[in-house]
Structures are given as structure tokens and as C-alpha cells.
């Protein structure tokens, strides 16, 4: 059994570029292969993230947060705004042994960047 998050976005190129630039995502699948893209899968480390081109209201509040482990949260943070995202604030060391930074992708989807301490 596997779970794959899928982001619906009217800004497929910008959202894909964000995950490529900030987290090193690489495209592993697209449908259709030629022409206007409806769906893509990108790989981030050992995980896959789906991106679907869909007209959605990106102003609606998000109810799901992606939590993505990185080697160095503070090294990744400067990449977020350069890639069209938004940083909510500085990283914080949490009592459960992680450094966490809360950021948003270009559509406003919540992403927690985490690092084991």
C-alpha cells in the first residue's frame, strides 16, 4: 500500500518549478505524453508527488500540510521565495527533535520543511 499526495493547481508550471528548485524534484511521469499536460508525477527523494492541472480556488484555506524532510532546513529556506513560495517565519527547534520551518508553495499550499536534530 502507498499514499501519494496530489496537488490540484491552475499554475502547474510554477508549482512544478517550485518543487524542482526548492527540493530537487524531478519529473518521472506526465499525461498525456505530448500536448497540454493534465497530470504529472515528480519524485522528491524516495517519494512521489502528483500535480494535476485543474481550475481550483487557490484562495480557499488548505487543510493538508506536506511535511518534507530535508538535510538542512536553514539552507533550503532562501530557495523558497526565489522559487515563488513564501516563508512564514524562521525555523524552530521542536521538543520532539526536529527543526521545522513553515512555508507555502506558489499556490499557498502549506509545506513543513523538517530536519532531524
Image: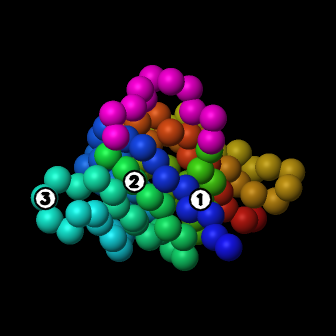
Nearer the observer, 106 or 3: 3
Mark sitting on residue 51: 2
C-alpha distance separating marks 1 and 3: 31 Å
Callout in the foreground (3, 2): 3
Find numbered disc 2 in the image and state the secondary structure of the residue it sits on.
strand
Q: Where is residue 113? Give x, y as percent.
A: 59, 53
Kindly report the secondary structure that dominates the magenta region of the rendered protein.
loop
Q: Which residues are magenta?
A: 54-64
Find numbered disc 1 in the image and state the secondary structure of the residue it sits on.
strand
Q: Do the CB atoms of the residues marked 1 and 2 lie less than 8 Å apart? A: no
Sequence-first tag of 1 and 3: 3
Q: Where is residue 65? Give x, y as percent.
A: 62, 44
The residue that label 3 is drawn on is 35
Callout in the foreground (1, 2): 2
Q: Where is residue 68? Give x, y as percent.
A: 59, 59
Residue at 70% from the left image edge and 45% from the top image edge: 92
The residue that label 1 is drawn on is 68
Mark 1, other Cα within 10 Å: few <14 / some 14–19 / many ≥20 = some
Sequence-first tag of 1 and 2: 2
Residue at 28% from the left image edge and 53% from the top image edge: 38
Using residue 20 as the reference point, say whether residue 117 is left or right of it: right
Mark 3, other Cα within 10 Å: few <14 / some 14–19 / many ≥20 = few
Which residue, as the protein is rendered here, is positioned at the far top?
A: 59
Amino acid at each position: 500500500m502507498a499514499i501519494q499526495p496530489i496537488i490540484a493547481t491552475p499554475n502547474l508550471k510554477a508549482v512544478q518549478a517550485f518543487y524542482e528548485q526548492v527540493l530537487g524534484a524531478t519529473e518521472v511521469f506526465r499525461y498525456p505524453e505530448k500536448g497540454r499536460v493534465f497530470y504529472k508525477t515528480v519524485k522528491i527523494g524516495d517519494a512521489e508527488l502528483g500535480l494535476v492541472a485543474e481550475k481550483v480556488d487557490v484562495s480557499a484555506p488548505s487543510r493538508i500540510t506536506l511535511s518534507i524532510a530535508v538535510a538542512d532546513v536553514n539552507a533550503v529556506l532562501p530557495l523558497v521565495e526565489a522559487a515563488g513560495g513564501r516563508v512564514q517565519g524562521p525555523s524552530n527547534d521542536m521538543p520532539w527533535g526536529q527543526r521545522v520551518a513553515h512555508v507555502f508553495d506558489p499556490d499557498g499550499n502549506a509545506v513543513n520543511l523538517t530536519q532531524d536534530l
